[in-house]
Image (spheres, helix red, strand yellow):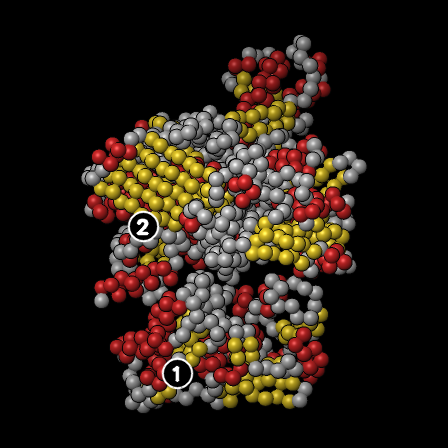
Amino acid sequence: MKEFEYLRPANLEEACRLKAQWGEEARVLAGGQSLLNMMKLRFATPACLIDLSRLPELQQVRSAGSAVSIGSMLTYSAAKSALPDYGVVQDALEVIADMQVRNLGTLGGSCCQADPFGDMPNIVRALGVQMEALSSSGSRMIAAEEFITGPLETSMRPDEVLTRLHFPELPPGSGSAYEKFSYRKGDYAIVSIAAVLTVDGDGRCASASLVAGGMGVGPAPLPKTAAAMLGQRLDEEQLARIAKLARGECEPADDAVYGSAAYKRALVQTLTGRALARAWSRAQASAQAGA
Amino acid sequence: MSYIGKRMLRREDRRILLGKSRYVADIRLPNMLHARILRSPVAHARIKSIDLSAARALPGVAVAIDREDVRHIPRFGHRHTRWPVGDKSVFCLEKALFVGDEIAAVAAETPYLARDAVELIEVDYEELPAVVDPELAMQDGAALVHDELVAAGIIPGNTMYTMKLRAGDMAKAEKEAELTVSGRFYSNQPVCNPLETHGVVASWDEINGEMTIWTSTQGITIVRDGVADLLGIPARKVHVIVPDVGGGFGAKVGLFAHELITCILARKTGRPVSLILDRTEELTACTSRCAQVRYAELMLTREGRFVGWREKVIQDQGAYAHAGPSVMQLGTELGMLPYKIPNVQIDGFDIYTNKNPGSAYRGFGVPQAAFVRDSLLHMAAKKLGVEPEYLMRLNMVKGEECPITLALGQKVDSTGVDLCLEKVVSEAAKRGWKKGLWRGMGYGTTLKHSSCRHPRMDYDHDTVRISMQGDGGVLAETAATHIGQGNWTTLAQIVADQLGMDIDNVSVTGHSSAGPRGFGTWGSRTITITGNALVRACDAVKARILPVAAHLLEAHADELEFADNGVRMKTAPTRKLSLRELITVMERQKGRLPPGMEAGPVEVVASYDSPTTLPDEDGVGNMSMTYSAAAHACWLEVDPGTGKVTILDYIMAEDAGVAINPLIVEGQHQGAVAMAISQVLFEGLRYDEQGQLLNGNYRDYYTALATDIPDLSQVHDCGVPSKTTLLGQKGAGESGNVPALAAVANAIEEATGIRFTEMPITPEKILLALAAREGDAA
């Protein structure tokens, strides 16, 4: 590590003031599970860390109907009970790192880190989570698709801090799932697939969103594949067809360590099939429960 | 005999488990500086200039040094080559030879400042073509790694060592062969990955001209002699102290540049200096297992009898020799065991490349050879339509045949390898393993040498000192540092039994050059060579004490025995003198001693050198006095959607001779198997075509996690006592590392129908091979 200032603001107002004051020189410290490793390797050398991890208002969970909003500093462990109906989140919580990391790491921190092999960026993208950012001049909502702009890059301004993640309402017949392949348990993904869909009264797919992680750039949506699902009953044959479409649509980067493009394409096919099968059965269960 | 064979808890563990152990990084000396090495970011480059001025100007920096400070120091690293000069200088003099090579160093008030200062050093590199692929590097016209050694006429090119192994008559083998299986195999380049990285603290006493070094090493005397020789300090004035060591596995045998650099910094500043390498340095620059390409052919008769072995071995040595040439020779020659192959023709080429050097790593070359051998055996079994265990049984050395001398002169004094094989075969049947869709099982075997006489080093000895204390206790000093193997417990069991003592009265140490001038701990030598030296030392102690006891007990020496912390009449155990009484008499009561005997302490130094021989120019010789054995069986499942391998179950049987402490023997085996599973499925340094290391941290360098290792709790004991070692003991730390590589590869072939010949066998390789086969079928 390089020497740095450590600041722990007492409230959000002070946090915004400090962020405005230090600008790009400062990084927000959330759970520190990615940032501190990068600092140890001197890949990140912030002059100042602004520790928001203990601000109570950034831990709060609020529900309105079936929609839930969480503070950006909510840890993975705490999110388990806060977001029970989002299958895609629950799946991810089982495969993100290890218990120690999940006890410290935060959903907001993972989104801001924007690691192209991370998990949360794919999930907020697939669900269409609204990201709330605050600065001294006020707060604004950023749509998930506009939040991450590239590997390790977000559209947050230097004077802003991420305060809340607004998860959307889940109509009856909603189902979602997350599939991730890593060489070892708890590693960053080689490839991951976040699938979110709804089933209508006829038992057909009414909406679908599919996002691939591990492609090398950040969350990579597969809109053509998702569109091909609409109006379909996702039986085994359809799942196989759609999984193959996903393989064709994805554009993974070749990586000497994390796998060749050919391998990642094959994984996209396998994981899409598995994620959709689970999301579909959850959607059907949700439809039945709603009926 | 009450301790040998007893499952005793390791006495080393308590302080480690309670967090009370102290490693080099825990050492804080008054006024101590912290050092950091600048390492080459490029694989191969001429160093045009180095500018230390900005680093020196940084407040808090005490000193910055580079090649200009070390030009007068001789080159080193020729222990295993026996060249007139070494291939390594303290800092790169003209060229940087791999990513991680030492360029310069600073010592500063804090470790953070030292890092800041290193970033300020400016080096002008003129990049040269990187030599990455050993098969290309050995061709004429390839860029030269060590052009200075070529110019000096020491080596002809990048081929730094050529090995020839010859036995029997290959023409005869070819005539007899009714089936030949062959392949090109690649053995990957994992690193040892000790939990504790390499680290050194050096302190220079200017007045007396003495250097004290605390270092994380397996070889106290190698460090002492090396530092003394290269820095021009008398060896008697170099003191090496080894605190707790957090693992070695071979990577801490030998003298390293960072040890010399720390001493130089301490001498220049007159202040103690601490240098703790980080994980990236450990992965990048602290040696690795020797990667090898092996073109191998196994010739058999129709009934499955092995008649010939032909092989071309190309070893990727990396930038420096270290122990590489010995790894290739010993590993190849002894890696053929336990199979009887009458006709052998092997040519080996050790090739310099611009990479992390290959050196000692648990198994010392035997795993690489055995991976190829047991893979080919499995392939042959499939062609012949027989079970692999049938071929193993038919061709392996059996206990009843021992002692037996094999084609290359390897004398197997005793073995339980046949028992190990039968054990795992019957156990697999008992557990109901079945070949099924995407499921398969495979076997692997080994004989692993217990210490050895390395080619070009005509010695295989160790030395210990036993001092009887006035309170009746005994201190046994060795040079065998404890690097996590529980050797101080095991050796204490030996001493306690030899002297008839309660083990609580026995201390064994091995952490300082103030101890006897022994060698160190590696290559399964501690239990055999050090153990034998201890037996000899105990015999000498007994020979000193016995006449005194006989005199005082008014008995004949042959009526007495050492037991119950003393010496007593065999027939009347109550007629006894305690060791405390005896030592007191011997040290302080001359009048009670036999007439003419002088008073004095009982302190004995003893050595043991194994009854082995160097190989001749055909490689024929008996380099190891005994071999431990093992057989493994692996049952696994492959996910056809991802290529992921899950090991469902794993069976181990081993022969460690007389197991002094079965608990420790089993633990060694379990750890060695986990390490091998990690190598075959996950590990290995990866370099790109420019010689850049692609996986220099633990996010990118994969080792197996606990979740990847099957239940290894049961190790079947098939021990057969050695006929050569003094207690029948054999090595235990390495045999487990050998059979797992082929056992896993063989099981993967059974599960998928595809033979993988290159480690690591990753999910990617498996899935793409499955896809290619489907494509071919369609």
The chain under label 2 reads B
Residue B746: give its label: 2
**Is residue B236 something one can see in this rendering?**
yes
Q: Is residue A266 above or below residue B236?
A: below
Q: Are marks 1 and 2 in contact (CB under 8 Å)?
A: no
Q: Is residue B732 left or right of residue A109?
A: left
Q: Residues within 10 Å of mark 1 (few under 14, many from 20)?
A: some
Q: What residue type is disc 1 on?
A: Pro
The chain under label 1 reads A
Circle 2 — which element? helix
Q: Quadrant of the C terminus of chain A?
A: bottom left
> Closest to the observer: B107 or A78?
B107
Residue B469 position by quadrant: top right
Q: Is residue B564 above or below residue B768?
A: above
Q: Nearer the viewer, mark 1 or mark 2?
A: 1
> Closest to the observer: B384 or B714?
B384
Q: Where's residue A257, x and y in %? A: 46, 62
Q: Where's residue A131, x and y in %? A: 54, 84
Between the C-alphas of marks 1 and 2, the distance is 43 Å
Q: Is residue B694 left or right of residue B257?
A: left
Pointer 1: what residue?
Answer: A223
Q: What residue type is disc 2 on?
A: Asn
Q: Is residue B713 above or below residue B241?
A: below
